[in-house]
Image (cartoon, rainbow, N blue to C red):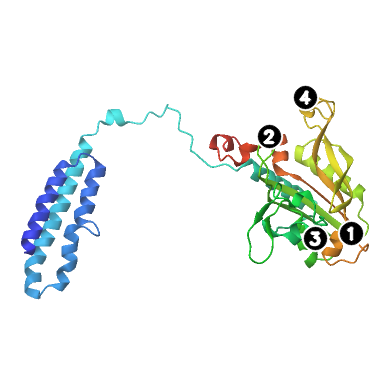
C-alpha cells in the first residue's frame, strides 16, 4: 500500500517538475512534495508508527524518492536558469534609480510637534485628558450656564450613557479643571488634543478638529504675561516677528475675555488679500481664568489668578503650509499628506 503511494507521488512529482516554467512554480513543486508538510515528507515522518519490518521496507524507498526529487529539482532549476536571456536581463547602471517609497508625517502631527517643542523650551508642561468627557468637566465646571447654546445638540455630540451625561469633548478646556484638581499653583501647561463639534463641514469648518490651549496660574499673573508669551510663541512658530492684538469678547470660563489676532504672516501687517486688507489674522480666544473655574477645581476664591488661551491646530497648519480647505486634514488623501 505504501509502496504504491510512493510510486504515485513520484509520478505526480516528475510531471509537475516538467510542467514548471519558472523559479516560482518550480519552488512551489518542491514545497508541495518535500517541504515541511510535503506529501513525501509526511510518509517519512510516519515511519516511526510502522512495525520494524515495514519500516525497513518503506524507509529506503521513501529516502530514495527524496534523493531523486532533490536531483530532479536541481536539474530543472539549472535548466530554467540557462533559459534566461542575460543580455536582456543585464542591469543598465546609467538608468536613474527608483526613489524608495517612504512615509511622511501628517501636517497636523508636524504642527503638534512644533507647538510642543516651542512651549517645552519655555518651561511648559504638556497635559492630556480624555476625549469622552462628562458634562461636569466639559461644561459645568467651566462656568457654562445650563441654558448655554453650546450644550444643545446643534453644537455637541452627546453619548448615551446609563450613569452620567457624557459628551465628545467640544474643547480641550476640561483638562484645565482635571489638572488643577491634582496640582497647586504656580504652574504653566499646554493641552493639545482632538475635539468634536456637531456642525456641518465646509472649507473652514470640520466636525473633528485639533485644538491647543495654554494655562498659566500663579499669584501675580496678568494679561501682560499672556501677550508676551503669545508673541514669543507665534514669532518662533512662523520664524518672523509677529505682533499681538486683543479685542474684547466673552467666554464663560474667562473674565475678562478677549479674541486675539496676530499681524498677517504674509504681508507683515501691511495689508494684503490674505488678511482681507486688515493687516491682522484672527487666531483664537483668551482671557483671565474666571474665579468660578478655580472654585470648581477646589481652589479658594480670589487667591490665585491666571490666564488661558487656545486656538485650532488646523488654523495654524493652514497658515503655515498655505492650505485653503480644512477638509483636507481628515480626507485621508495620500497625495495631500505626502507633500509634507
SS category of the residue bearing label 3? helix
In the picture, the disc for residue 291 is 1
Image quarter in which the N terminus is found: bottom left
Q: How crowded is mark 2: few (under 14 residues within 10 Å), some or many (20 or more)?
A: few
Marks 4 and 3 sit apart, C-alpha to C-alpha, by: 41 Å
Residue 185 seen from this side? no
Q: Which of marks 3 and 1 is nearer the N terminus?
A: 3
Marks 3 and 1 sit apart, C-alpha to C-alpha, by: 11 Å
Q: Earlier in the sequence, mark 4 or mark 3?
A: 3
In this view, the residue farthest toward the front is: 147
In the picture, the disc for residue 321 is 2
Marks 3 and 2 sit apart, C-alpha to C-alpha, by: 36 Å
Q: Which of marks 2 and 1 is nearer the N terminus?
A: 1
Instruction: Point out residue 266 in the picture as x, y percentages from the top left corner.
Output: 77, 29
The residue at which mark 3 appears reads as 141
Image quarter in which the C terminus is found: top right
Proximity of marks 3 and 2: CB atoms separated by less than 8 Å: no
Proximity of marks 4 and 2: CB atoms separated by less than 8 Å: no
Q: Which of marks 4 and 2 is nearer the N terminus?
A: 4
The residue at which mark 4 appears reads as 273
Amino acid at each position: 500500500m505504501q509502496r504504491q503511494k510512493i510510486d504515485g507521488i513520484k509520478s505526480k512529482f516528475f510531471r509537475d517538475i516538467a510542467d514548471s516554467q519558472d523559479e516560482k512554480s518550480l519552488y512551489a513543486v518542491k514545497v508541495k512534495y518535500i517541504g515541511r508538510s510535503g506529501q513525501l515528507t509526511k510518509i517519512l515522518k510516519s515511519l516511526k508508527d510502522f512495525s520494524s519490518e515495514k519500516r525497513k521496507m518503506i524507509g529506503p524507498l521513501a529516502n530514495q524518492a527524496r534523493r531523486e526529487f532533490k536531483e530532479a529539482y536541481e536539474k530543472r532549476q539549472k535548466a530554467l536558469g540557462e533559459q534566461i536571456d542575460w543580455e536582456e536581463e543585464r542591469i543598465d547602471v546609467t538608468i536613474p534609480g527608483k526613489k524608495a517609497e517612504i512615509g511622511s508625517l501628517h501636517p497636523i502631527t508636524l504642527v503638534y510637534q512644533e507647538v510642543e517643542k516651542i512651549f517645552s523650551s519655555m518651561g511648559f508642561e504638556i497635559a492630556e485628558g480624555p476625549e469622552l468627557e462628562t458634562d461636569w468637566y466639559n461644561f459645568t465646571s467651566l462656568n457654562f450656564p445650563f441654558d448655554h447654546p453650546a450644550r444643545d445638540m446643534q453644537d455637541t455630540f452627546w453619548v448615551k450613557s446609563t450613569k452620567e451625561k457624557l459628551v465628545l469633548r467640544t474643547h480641550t478646556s476640561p483638562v484645565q479643571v482635571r489638572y488643577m484638581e491634582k496640582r497647586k499653583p504656580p504652574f504653566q501647561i499646554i493641552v493639545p488634543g482632538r475635539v468634536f463639534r456637531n456642525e456641518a463641514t465646509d472649507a473652514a469648518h470640520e466636525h473633528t478638529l485639533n485644538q491647543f490651549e495654554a494655562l498659566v496660574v500663579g499669584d501675580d499673573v496678568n494679561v501682560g504675561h499672556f501677550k508676551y508669551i503669545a508673541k514669543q510663541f507665534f514669532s518662533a512658530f512662523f520664524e518672523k516677528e509677529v505682533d499681538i492684538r486683543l479685542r474684547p469678547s466673552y467666554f464663560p470660563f474667562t473674565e475678562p475675555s478677549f479674541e486675539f489676532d496676530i499681524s498677517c504672516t504674509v504681508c507683515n501687517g501691511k495689508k494684503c488679500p490674505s488678511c482681507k486688507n486688515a493687516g491682522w489674522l484672527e487666531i483664537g480666544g483668551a482671557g483671565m481664568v474666571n474665579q468660578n473655574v478655580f472654585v470648581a477645581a477646589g481652589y479658594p476664591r480670589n487667591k490665585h489668578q491666571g490666564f488661558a488661551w487656545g486656538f485650532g491646530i488646523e488654523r495654524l497648519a493652514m497658515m503655515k503650509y498655505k492650505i485653503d480647505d480644512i477638509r483636507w486634514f481628515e480626507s485621508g488623501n495620500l497625495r495631500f499628506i505626502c507633500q509634507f
